[in-house]
Image (tube, rainbow, N blue to C red):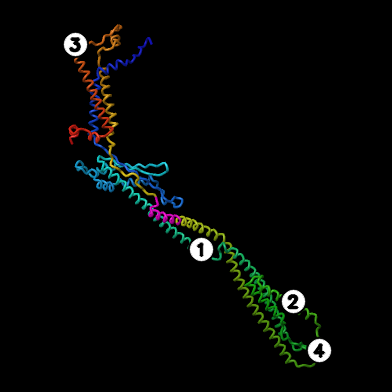
């Protein structure tokens, strides 16, 4: 520390002496500050604030029983109502109803200016209680306490009225939307139902649920077709046989000679027996029934048994005819040729006629079988097409049913919401929904919020002391006189051996010193009095001070 100067120590006694020597700066500054603070506290306009607390009562019926129509939060609802209440229309009504800014001092103020001031001074704050109950506070500031109270109560009434209107508008809007959507969904649902109905009508018989029936019909038709084709082959064979028989009879008739006629000629009355004719009739009946019924039908089973019996009888008759002995040729005797020839030819012609009838009958049967086969083939094609198109029909139906199900689900959901909406509307009408309720009505404010007396007091004290102290130290910095031994040692570079205090040896100096001390004490008491008065004014308010001040002083301080 030899090369550097040692730091100077701060001497408290020096600064105390400095403050005491220049005490008037502090006393006067503090006095002026107190007077200024008291003057401001008296002359500054009083701003009063009133507020009201509105509770948002929850629903009396929980949401699990009645679903809410809207998801609007309390903050959003209050914000919406606040914007509406702060509109020009509502603020103008409030100004007119409460006569805000209606005094002589406001006669030159435009209505827009009044509305702007009122809008700025309205405050809405949402709070949440410990148990989840929501509430919000409405506050308003103004110079006239009574009008401030009226304005806050009017705002609260407007808030409640608007909340009812907003909730009704939300409910009505929601239910109107649901009704419109439900009507639109119902129209779509009916359209899809008609489309599904038309599709089923258009492809009736080829629907997926008719697949097993179609397969059964297809199998039966194929069996009938096979039976008809077999009967057709039999009839064609019979036609060929009849054609051959006719040709044989004609050949016999053409090559007939009278000398060839035997003496014991027997002209058959019929070419076929009853059993053969019965067998043919049964076969025709079997073919006809086979076109309509399956092989498992009771009539088909019965006819099949009758056919077997008839075939057995024909076979037995043929065996008997084959095993019976041929009659011996009778002795020739003279006979008349012409009647026999005529009779023989007539018999042959009758035989040809009968064969022709059977031939035509066979042709008609073949034609009928061919028509039945064509009809069965056409039906088989129709059923085969139905079976082949079943996957496509199923895919189309799945697509239509999917659209139908989606629309139906949406319709059912909207219908459920519509029922909830009807219940919610009924609940709102019966005042069972969320409602606004005023907990604390606004009262006439007794104490202004501005100016803040305690803050003004603290600022005045700080300004008074700070200004006095600042002036003292500023003058000390500007003072170049030597007052401390250290200053002399630093200037003269010689040590100070001793110091002597100020000695007042003249009477006038003692009188001046007495007056100085007396006035200092007096003004310090004045400062203390001003501080006490300011403190009372800050704690009790101006009305209290006016009430307890003497009349002369009151008229002097407050001439108005």
Q: Which residue is mark 4?
A: 330
Q: Which residue is mark 3?
A: 506
CA gap between label 3 and label 2 equals 184 Å
Residue 93 location, x and y as percent?
A: 26, 48
Q: Earlier in the sequence, mark 3 or mark 2?
A: 2
Circle number at residue 312? 2
**For the residues carrying marks 4 and 1, which lies nearer the camera in this image?**
1
Q: Earlier in the sequence, mark 2 or mark 1?
A: 1
Residue 197 location, x and y as percent?
A: 50, 64
In front: 549, or 313?
549
Residue 366 drawn above or below residue 137 = below
CA gap between label 4 and label 2 equals 34 Å
Residue 50 location, x and y as percent?
A: 30, 41
- For label 2, count other residues whose C-alpha is less than 10 Å away and answer few (under 14), some (14-19) or many (20+): some
In front: 250, or 138?
138
> Considering the numbered disc 4 on the image, is that residue within a helix, a strand or a loop?
loop
Identify the residue at image location x=48%, y=57%.
408
- For label 4, count other residues whose C-alpha is less than 10 Å away and answer few (under 14), some (14-19) or many (20+): few
Identify the residue at image location x=36%, y=12%.
6
What count of labels does the image hold? 4
Q: Earlier in the sequence, mark 3 or mark 1?
A: 1
Horizontal side of 538 relative to 506 (left or right) equals right
Magenta stretch in the rendered image: 415-433
Q: Which residue is mark 1?
A: 199
């Amino acid at each position: 520390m030899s090369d550097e100067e040692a730091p100077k120590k701060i001497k408290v006694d020096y600064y105390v002496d400095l403050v005491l020597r220049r005490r008037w700066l502090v006393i006067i500054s503090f006095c002026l500050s107190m007077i200024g603070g008291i003057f401001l506290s008296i002359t500054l306009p009083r701003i009063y604030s009133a507020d009201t607390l509105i509770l948002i009562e929850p629903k009396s019926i929980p949401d699990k029983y009645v679903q809410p129509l809207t998801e609007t939060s309390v903050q959003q609802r209050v914000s919406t109502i606040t914007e509406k209440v702060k509109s020009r229309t509502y603020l103008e009504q409030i100004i007119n109803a409460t006569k805000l800014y209606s005094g002589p001092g406001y006669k030159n103020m435009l209505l827009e200016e009044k509305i702007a001031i009122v809008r700025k001074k309205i405050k809405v704050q949402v709070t949440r209680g410990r148990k989840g109950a929501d509430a919000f506070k409405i506050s308003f500031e103004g110079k006239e306490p009574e009008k401030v109270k009226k304005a806050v109560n009017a705002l609260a009434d407007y808030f409640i009225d608007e909340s009812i209107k907003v909730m009704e508008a939300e409910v009505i809007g929601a239910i109107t939307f649901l009704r419109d959507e439900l009507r639109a969904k119902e129209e779509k649902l009916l359209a899809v139902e008609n489309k599904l109905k038309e599709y089923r009508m258009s492809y009736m018989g080829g629907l997926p649920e008719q697949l097993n029936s179609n397969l059964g019909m297809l199998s039966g038709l194929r069996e009938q077709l096979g039976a008809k084709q077999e009967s057709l082959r039999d009839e064609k064979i019979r036609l060929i046989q009849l054609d051959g028989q006719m040709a044989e009879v004609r050949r016999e008739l053409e090559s007939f000679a009278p000398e060839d006629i035997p003496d014991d000629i027997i002209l058959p009355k019929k070419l076929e027996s009853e059993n053969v004719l019965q067998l043919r009739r049964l076969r025709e009946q079997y073919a006809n029934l086979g076109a309509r019924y399956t092989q498992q039908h009771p009539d088909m089973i019965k006819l099949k048994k009758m056919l077997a019996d008839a075939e057995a009888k024909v076979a037995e008759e043929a065996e008997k005819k084959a095993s019976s002995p041929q009659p011996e040729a009778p002795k020739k005797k003279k006979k008349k040729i012409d009647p026999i020839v005529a009779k023989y030819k007539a018999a042959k012609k009758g035989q040809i006629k009968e064969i022709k009838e059977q031939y035509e009958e066979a042709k008609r049967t073949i034609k009928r079988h061919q028509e039945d086969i064509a009809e069965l083939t056409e039906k088989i094609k129709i059923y085969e097409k139905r079976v082949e198109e079943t996957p496509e029909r199923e895919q189309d139906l799945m697509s239509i049913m999917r659209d139908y199900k989606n629309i139906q689900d949406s319709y059912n959901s909207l219908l459920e919401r519509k029922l909830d909406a009807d219940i919610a509307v009924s609940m709102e009408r019966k005042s069972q929904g969320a409602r606004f309720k005023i907990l604390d009505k606004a009262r006439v404010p007794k104490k202004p919020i501005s100016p803040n007396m305690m803050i003004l007091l603290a600022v005045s004290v700080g300004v008074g002391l700070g200004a006095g102290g600042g002036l003292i130290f500023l003058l000390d910095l500007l003072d170049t006189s030597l007052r401390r031994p250290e200053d002399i040692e630093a200037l003269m570079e010689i040590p100070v051996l001793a110091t002597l205090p100020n000695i007042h040896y003249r009477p006038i100096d003692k009188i001046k010193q007495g007056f100085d001390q007396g006035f200092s004490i007096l003004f310090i008491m004045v400062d203390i009095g001003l501080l006490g008065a300011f403190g009372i004014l800050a704690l009790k308010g101006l009305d209290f001070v006016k009430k307890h001040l003497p009349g002369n002083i009151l008229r002097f301080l407050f001439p108005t």
